[in-house]
Image (cartoon, grey):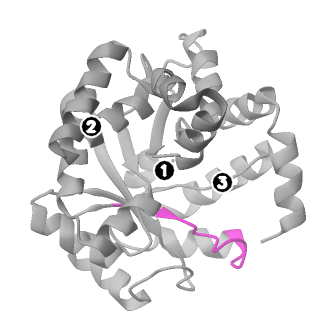
Amino acid sequence: MSEEKARAQAMRFQDINAIIEVLDNAYDEGIQSFMCTTHDRIAQVCDHMRADPQRYKDFKFMPCMPYAHKYANAVTEDGMLGALKRFMPDEGFLNAAMRGGMSLARKDIEGITTLLIDAEMKMFQGLNTPVIFLQNVVVDLLLGLGFKEAFRIFADHVKKRYNAEPGFITMNLPRLLDVLDELGIENPIVCSNINKIGFRMSGGFEAYEKALRDRKFRAIAMSVFASGAIPPAEAIEWVCEQPNIESIVFGASSRGNIRNTRDLVRRHWPEAKQENAA
């Protein structure tokens, strides 16, 4: 909620070593899952971890795609053809370009979509990515447009090509669950805002309570602190009492805050769920 703090963090994390330091701190505190966009800097993080596989053998990336600014910047810097070469999968530029070209010629949305997923995943080659997420900007746009089949295309490709679980991030949990049920996507992984004061919980607080109580899905709670509006201990205690939540995703940039959040989760989450806290 502080613009001044946001600016200071943006300056700090221009240095890739500052990013690595935070990830190392989290990893050493027992938090082994990192949920991230496909920003260009993440490619540098991936290179760092590939260079030391023994140190990071238990580290898990949870990529969230797409990162739209990356494509716009690449076209500006390298032109359209250069941008295509930069992001095409390693199966070969010609093969991927033909795949995309034929897809465009046939107006084949599935071919274009899978090509873009492969381009986004290129930086994670050889690393552990057990869950791959579709960003809420795209998820909620598709919900609004009624283009439901895109969720099936995404889920099928992630499972088949990457042997990973598809995940969906949304600002409207109840509406997305209805669509995923309609598509036959069983027991989906869905990340959404879940917090005590209903901050950015589109669809209404009561609808979220009902979904957590009655629907079959694997919930990841984000924005549990409501952008700083709820004290950490109060926020974690409340979210840990809710049914059907398998993981909590939180942002932190200091070892002390990482450790404090981890300790709060351990204190309030039942023993059977502690291993799933991320």
Vertical position of residue 269 compared to residue 38: above or below: below
The rendered magenta stretch, by its main secondary structure, is classed as: loop
Residue 274, position as x, y percentages in the image: 46, 50
Residue type at numbered disc 3: Gly
Residue 211, position as x, y percentages in the image: 28, 78
Q: Which label was assigned to residue 142?
A: none
Distance Cα–Cα, label 2 vs label 1: 31 Å
Q: Which label was assigned to residue 251?
A: 3
Q: Could you tell me which quadrant the N terminus lies in? A: bottom right
Residue 45, position as x, y percentages in the image: 63, 25
**Residue at 54 percent of width and 10 percent of height:** 54
The answer to which of marks 3 and 1 sits earlier in the sequence is 3
Neighbour tally class for label 2: few under 14, some 14-19, many 20 plus, Cα within 10 Å = some
Residue 257, position as x, y percentages in the image: 76, 52
Specify the quadrant of the image occupied by residue 94: top left
Q: Is residue 24 left or right of residue 68?
A: right
Distance Cα–Cα, label 3 vs label 2: 30 Å
- SS class, disc 1: loop
**Residue at 72 percent of width and 34 percent of height:** 25
Tell which of 237 and 122 is nearer to you. Answer: 122
**Residue at 53 percent of width and 46 percent of height:** 67
Residue type at numbered disc 1: Ala
The answer to which of marks 3 and 2 sits earlier in the sequence is 2
Q: Which label was assigned to residue 277?
A: 1
**Labels 3, 2: front one:** 2
